[in-house]
Image (cartoon, grey):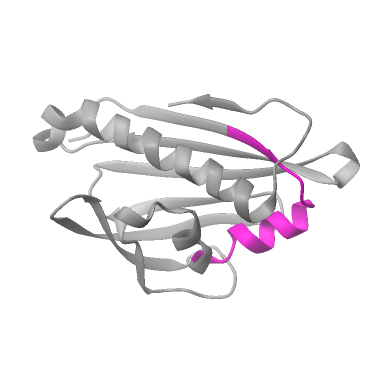
Amino acid sequence: MVHRIHRIHRIQTLPVTPDKAWDFFSDPCNLARITPPWMDFRIVSGCADHTYPGQIIEYRVRPFPLVRLGWLTEITQARSPVFFVDEQRRGPYAFWHHQHHFAAVENGAAVRMTDLVHWALPWYALPVRALVRRRLRIIFDYRQHALERLLGRAEQGEDACRA
């Protein structure tokens, strides 16, 4: 049973071309570089050199101290260099649908990256919903700063954050 669907919506402008952004984000091995170290994120299988529809990626994560979870996602859609979608097939959520969109800005000199995540917890995890929401906000905040460190920070444009 899926309960209330929650949404994370993040927009970040990065000073790289859409092709360079695609090359970075479509390589699943880069996920560990933009995930907080305390999550001990590890790819178990499926780390191809690019993202493609039907790709299955298996991870291990530590979302909370002493809690290690397996997570299996499928790339359900991908259109280079515009967008891709990953959906959880097995893992901690009752529902997880993550859209990654890339749009050229500044005449192609930068890219506006949009993350749109819809998620829901299984019924037995509902008592910790507020904690999970806060943790996801922290994870996406870390991701934003890691991307600025790795790819640079765009001088123009406003970034939006809603979780």
Please tell me which residue is depicted at 37% across the width and 59% down the height of the picture.
Answer: 73
Residue 29 at x, y = what percent?
A: 50, 68
Q: Is residue 19 left or right of residue 118?
A: right
Please tell me which residue is depicted at 85% across the width and 46% down the height of the picture.
Answer: 109
Front one among 64 and 75: 64
Q: In this view, does 142 lie to the left or right of 111?
A: left
Residue 57 at x, y = what percent?
A: 40, 67
Front one among 86 and 152: 152
Residue farthest toward the front in the current orientation of the protein:
149
Residue 163 at x, y = what percent?
A: 42, 26
Residue farthest toward the left in the current orientation of the protein:
124
Residue 90 at x, y = what percent?
A: 26, 57
- For residue 75: magenta? no
Q: Is residue 123 left or right of residue 121?
A: left
Residue 91 in sight from this viewpoint: no
Residue stretch in magenta: 11-28
Q: Is residue 9 left or right of residue 127?
A: right
- For residue 23: magenta? yes
Please tell me which residue is depicted at 16% across the width and 31% down the height of the picture.
Answer: 128
Residue 151 in sight from this viewpoint: yes
Which quadrant of the view contains residue 45? bottom left
Q: On screen, 50 above or below 140?
A: below
Please tell me which residue is depicted at 38% across the width and 37% down the height of the picture.
Answer: 138
Q: On screen, 138 above or below 39?
A: above
Q: In which quarter of the image is the N terminus?
A: top left
